[in-house]
Image (spheres, rainbow, N blue to C red):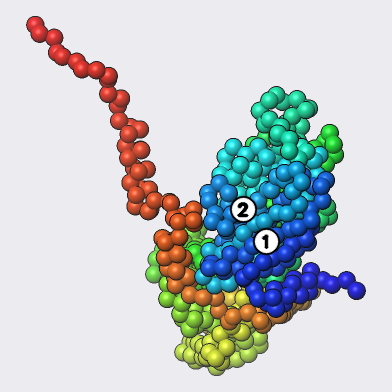
Amino acid sequence: MRLSPYAVVLLGLLRVLRHGGASGLLELSLGKFRNVLLNQTNPVEAVIRNIASNVTVVIFQVHAQQSDVVISFDKNPSLNSSGTGVDKGLVSILRPQQSVCTWYLRSLDASQVLSTAISIPYMEKDPIPGGCNLEFDLEVDPNIYLDYTLVDIHIKFAPANLGYTRGANPPSCDSGTGQNSRWRLRYDVYQYFLPENDLSEMVLMSHIRKMSEVQSIKANGVKMLTLTTDDKTNVYFSSLPGQGVIYNVIVWDPLWNTSAAYIPVHTYACSFADLVDNCSSLNLLFMGFIFTGFFFFVFITRVTGLGYDVRLILTAVAGIVGGLFLVASWWRFGSVLLCMFVIGLVLGFLFSSTVFFTPLGDYRVFRDDVVFWVTFSSVALMIPVLFVGCPRILNILASGIVGSYAVILAIACYVYTSLAYITLDLLRRVLNDYFSRAYTNVPFQTNDFIILSVWVMLALSGVTVQLRRERSEVPFPPHPYLTWKRERERRSTNVLDPSHHIPPLRERIHNKLLHIKEFFQKEQPAGERTPLLL
């Protein structure tokens, strides 16, 4: 019976826990993944024995989800013999008669970090990823370096070199550009998407395995482009915040028809600890946008005579500010009740609007504005009150139902549907003094039944997936501001962390301003000039 990748990772984790976690010796086999728990104080010694004589290079790599790990050749890592990050690897060039390789692993986090490690062997005709590195710290660097913004993702890597036998000198990286040099190599860049809306460690650990070795990369990844040695070894992709994606590069030698893989790298295009692009804050930004944008649009329409386009622009700006404010309040204060109250109100408004969208809304008693708004507000407030004891369920329901209704509104821009009037009728009643006298009955036709089915399907599937995914998780992520403070304190005392050597923000801004000032200053003439005496 074949086990699923999730089951394999789970069994590996149980084996790690049974054998003591993050301490002692980690025995590895070539081409086999091992899960390991790492911590800051006890380095793990990873060892491979009985390496075959036809193996010339071993690439060792380790992956974690969000906490940086240190991988090094020595127990006391140095800058040019170690790497730090969530996806890092080292290349061991084997000497003649060498049959054992050793590396050392530890995390930069005080708590235990789940990681997965593998060592991959290559022969003398296989190209060596990062073998012609001139940019990064390692002499041979097989790593892919990734950075992202909310707009794009940028990956870059060092050029590869040709393979060679044990004990021989490596081929020169700059001796000619012919077919006998590294210039004949080709680079295939692959992309692989993780399951949508799933940020769990277990999913990442199971899928990173599909992007680590050449054959599995070709079988599971999507080849995006091919680079030659004439091209720059950096590529840009569009950013998808909250969506997990894995990138890797296969270097191919067309003369020998051999290949080797770089170290796969993953990203969610968001941070688990930062302020604006926090992976757990995307829903708060969406709800805050709706909440603030709605009330601001009503306000400027009632009290100003601005045009419709201007009001839409101002509403979008106000919505973004409101969304960022809600995210900032969560980041700084970690107030679950405040955030869930806003989210509950959004869901409550949609629920109350749906109730009055039915024939109940045409009852004569609701023509009176006082009766209508008191009843409407009571129904809307009922939602956050009912779910005050289970905020996670409220958050999941709001995300699934409100998010799926946003899809319906997008469809309504191109296909007519009466479902759009669930919220439009409410907006009309707020903005127009005499709308209360109008009947709000609307046709419900084939398009509406189809789109209603889509709404129900999207809402049910979204809620179900989130409930299944979150049932074994902590109800809410740790307080981001507290996490950031701990991370800053750790960086200020850990000299091995590359960010320790970055100057403070104030000093960097001051240096930039000085550089700009010098740019506009006129160049002073050399030497000394004395005015002529007449």
Q: Amino acid at mark 2?
A: Phe
Give the spatial CA distance, label 2 vs label 1.
10 Å
Q: Residues within 10 Å of mark 1 (few under 14, many from 20)?
A: many
User: The N terminus lies in which quarter of the figure?
Assistant: bottom right
* Residue 214, horizontal then vertical, whole percent: 80, 51
Viewer can see residue 81? yes
**Helix, strand or loop at mark 1:** strand
Disc 1 marks a residue whose amino acid type is Ala
Mark 2 residue crowding within 10 angstroms, few (<14) / some (14–19) / many (20+): many
In the rendered image, residue 518, in percent from the top left (x then y), is placed at: 32, 34
Closer-to-camera residue (211/153): 211
* Foreground pick, 100 / 164: 100
Res. 458 in view: no
Count of marks placed on residues: 2
Q: Position of residue 178 (x, y in %)?
A: 75, 25
Q: Which mark is residue 46?
A: 1
The disc label shown at residue 331, or none: none
Disc 2: which residue? 73
- At 65% from the left edge and 51% from the top edge, which residue is drawn? 90
| Res. 344 image quadrant | bottom right
Vertical placement of residue 389 versus 507, above or below? below
- Residue 410 relative to residue 480: left or right: right
Q: Position of residue 283 (x, y in %)?
A: 57, 71
- Considering depth in this image, is 244 or 488 the residue closer to the camera? 488
Q: Earlier in the sequence, mark 2 or mark 1?
A: 1
Q: Is residue 126 above or below residue 215?
A: above
